[in-house]
Image (cartoon, rainbow, N blue to C red):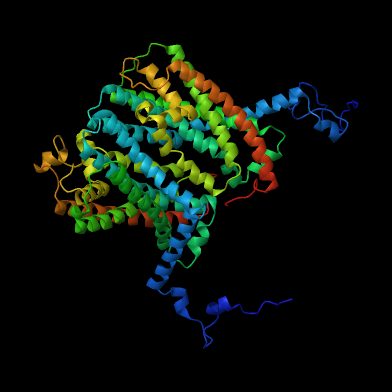
Amino acid sequence: MSLPAREPARPPGAARRTNAAPGRNAFVYRPTASPQEAAIWTQRQVALTNLRTVAGRAYPRVTGLLREKSWIFFEILLPFLSTSAFVFVYRALEAPPQYIGFVVLGGAMTAFWLNVIWMMAQQLWWEKSQGNLELYFAAPMNIMAVLFGMAFGGFVMSSSRAAAVLVIATTVYGVTFAIDQWALLIGVFLLTLAALYGLGMVLASLFLMWGREAWHLTQLLVEPVYFVSGLNFPVGRLGVLGSIAISILPLAVGLDAMRQLAFADAAYPIGTPSPAVEALILVAMTVVFLVLARWTLVTLERRARQEGRLSVRWQ
Amino acid sequence: MTTEPAIRPDAAGLASPEWGGFDMARTRGRGWPDVRRSFTTAVRLGWQMEANWTDPVLFFIYSVAKPLASALILVVMLDVISGGAKPEYRAFVVVGSALWSFVLSGVSGLAWMILDDRERYRMLKYIYVSPSDFLAVVFGRGVARIGVGAMGAAITLAIGVVFLNVPFDVSRIDWPILVTVMTLGVGSILAIALLLAAICMQTRQESWSYPEAAAGALFLVSGVVFPLSVLPLPVQALGLLTPLTWWVEGVRLALFPGGLTAIGGPGSLFTELTGTAGPGAAMIVLVLLATGAMATLGALAVFRASDRRAKDRGLLDQTTGS
């Protein structure tokens, strides 16, 4: 049954709201007869609210890109320093120049991985510690939209870091790329990021349940993942371990494909799939991670509510 | 129903002295015994915060995984290029990356203690106004993380020897040198850590990454996983001024006498200046002592200055949303 729309009472002297009035939009003003009717949202309102949520959650990360200058310094400096250390290891070993390029590419991709684990996986735990998480759940939005917003903002933020590291390190260490298939390289890069942030969304959902262990386990996902992903060497050298990494870690498969495409003239160890096959693996990973993130989020949110963990802090 | 006694037994020590007056000694504290008690309590608290979030097995895996993975990355890089033809270089990188877990845990331990207690648990101001010596509490909390780092370093070395064919002979260890350089080295790590804790006391939400950034910079110039000779000369000079360079060199010399040197060798600034292939044990200890003393004095001065400024600007109870 549809209820008649009625203008709510206006304070005396207040101007009548029109469609052109500020604030007159699908979110904040809709004449309804009752609170019950106001709670019934149209599909358009739901979609717009979720889009607005994505934009709202991405905003601080995109804006913070320039607002907090010291972040720029440290987030470029950190990957650059560790990249430089590995470059010098290869120089000490008198390795072929392509290996220095492998390290530089891997160093640039660490910006994304660090962003995924620190600012995606751990974010909901972080919000819980600050007391924001209950506000997220109380707000009339889909929490997946929050995760998408975090991912989009993180992607923009990390892209600038990765680009800076890539340009600086390439210039300083004289890396030469040999690219034959630009379109595939760009496609693989974007698919890698989609799969990476999908994995970040899964981890964020998992960390919803955890307390301090989330912090510690995040740390556990840095160096061991770098190792099995072949951050500084072709992952095919790891044999079975490398194959397992390629089948479950977007960083491993993405890096391997990008190296094959960016250093087409390099002697590359056999044993890993071709870039086209690895692109398909990344597509599959993206779909699986997004579906899994949705499922884990719903399941673990329900469980966290039952166990009263959504608002537990400092545990 | 039971009623609570007027004076709880555990509060008896807080009551007036038997003679009924005011005991001035209580306001002054008892000196060293109080410092020792604060330190041990902080160590215990720090250890529980570090370790009681999970079961011992997972904690062990967590403690070992990071340094071990770091060492394995380097070992595979080495094998990719040399095909296992340089066993002495393998020992070089395994020892360097194992020791570096000390530095990472020590440096981040003290700085994160300040940030954890100020930003997350919001207890720093209460710790500060308690009768405990603040410096003793800071060091005590950091010791727990150094313990975790030490465990990771020891296991990485053991795995390097057992599984990665690092040539190691216990009978060849130079124990006096090892004990001396380890003592001086850990002192230097604590000094650098104190310096970073002092900086973090002044800074805002991005400070969590400062220890890692500092450790990353030191990693590059300390000859941890590659000889300094591959670096440009001015950077080598910077590395020679760092106590960590001499600490890592000293431990390598004690564990693998006659092995590769990170400081000397062809093309190195050290060899150019001294005309020798590498530093001897006495020189390592002396330079480590000198650079470590400078680092310690500098860190103490900076910490005291930071402490005064934090009180002046109200930084001890600021939270910056990090």
Q: Position of residue B164 (x, y in %)?
A: 29, 41
User: Residue at (67%, 36%) from the top-left corner?
Assistant: A298
**How many dots with numbers?**
0
Instruction: Please name whichever residue, B319 or A309, is drawn nearer the observer in this view of the structure.
Output: A309
User: Residue at (61%, 77%) from the top-left corner?
Assistant: B8
User: Residue at (68%, 49%) from the top-left corner?
Assistant: A308
Residue B305 shows in the view: no
| A212 relative position to B208: left or right | right
Instruction: Please name whichever residue, A114 or A171, is drawn nearer the observer in this view of the structure.
Output: A114
Vertical relation: B175 (above or below) B223: below
Furthest residue in direction bottom, as rendered = B19
Q: Quadrant of the N terminus of chain B?
A: bottom right
| A240 relative position to A207: left or right | left
Location of residue B25 (image quadrant): bottom left
Vertical relation: B180 (above or below) A169: below
Location of residue A170 (image quadrant): top left
User: Residue at (62%, 46%) from the top-left corner?
Assistant: A131
Q: Position of residue B190 (x, y in %)?
A: 34, 54
Instruction: Please name whichever residue, B213 or A222, is drawn nearer the observer in this view of the structure.
Output: A222
Q: Position of residue B39 (x, y in %)?
A: 41, 64
Vertical relation: B48 (above or below) A157: below
| B195 relative position to B1: left or right | left
Residue B157 shows in the view: yes
Q: Position of residue B286 (x, y in %)?
A: 18, 54
